[in-house]
Image (cartoon, rainbow, N blue to C red):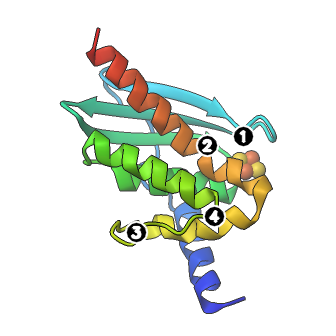
Amino acid sequence: MSSLDDLYRRVIMDHYQKPRNKGKIDDDSGLVINLNNPTCGDSISLSLKVEDGIVVDAKFIGEGCSISMSSASMMTEAVKGKPEEEAIRLITIFSDMMQGKEPDDSVDLGDIEALQGVCKFPARIKCATLAWKALEQGIKKSDDKSNE
Ligand code: FES
């Protein structure tokens, strides 16, 4: 194993063992998106609060493998406090990354970079993308809500 793979593995395990933003948004102002991975039954419940085009809060609870739970932890950390457009951009970058495309150098992916290697394991891609799909649905729902 290269030292980079080893570093990435450690970053993934750190998020798995000490998940960031674990829980539910307490007030009723947020949205909740529940998704599961049909191939294994693992699940995520993402609470999202988008106000004036900013993702002001993101929390998750779920059951799943280290890849799915660490990806959820990294995702909430990356989008919290960011403008919605930036979150959408990250969703696209992450999806491209899972298809084996090199991430754009101009974007600081932070810990998300550690999931790059997942694209080599097709069975795990669904694990890594679960939280991001929930985010995508949450942003869409919040846009629909604000357009009502
Ligand atoms: Fe179920 Fe990864 S094995 S989410």
Nearer to the camera, 91 or 75 = 91
Label 3: how many Cα within 10 Å (few below 14, some 14–19, many 20+): few
Which residue is identified by label 1? 42
Quadrant showing the N terminus: bottom right
Residue ID at (38%, 33%): 48
User: Residue placed farthest to the top in the image?
Assistant: 148
Label 4 CB-ligand 1 distance < 8 A: no
- Foreground label between 1 and 4: 4
Disc 2 target residue:
130
User: Pointer 2 and pointer 1: residues touching (CB < 8 Å)?
Assistant: yes
Residue 41 position, x and y percent, is 77, 36
User: Distance of mark 2 from mark 1, alpha carbons?
Assistant: 9 Å
CA gap between label 1 and label 4 equals 24 Å
Does ligand 1 reach within 8 Å of label 1's beta carbon?
yes
Looking at marks 4 and 2 on the same chain, the residue that comes earlier in the sequence is marked by 4
Note whether ligand 1 is within 8 Å of mark 2: yes
Q: Nearer the viewer, mark 4 or mark 2?
A: 4
In percent of width and height, residue 122 lies at 77, 56
Q: Amino acid at mark 1?
A: Asp
Q: Residue visible at 60% across and 48% down?
A: 129
- Say which label, 2 or 1, has the lower sequence index: 1
**Vertical comparison of 93 with 22: above or below:** below
Helix, strand or loop for disc 4: loop
Q: Which residue is mark 4?
A: 100
Give the CA distance from mark 4 to mark 3: 18 Å
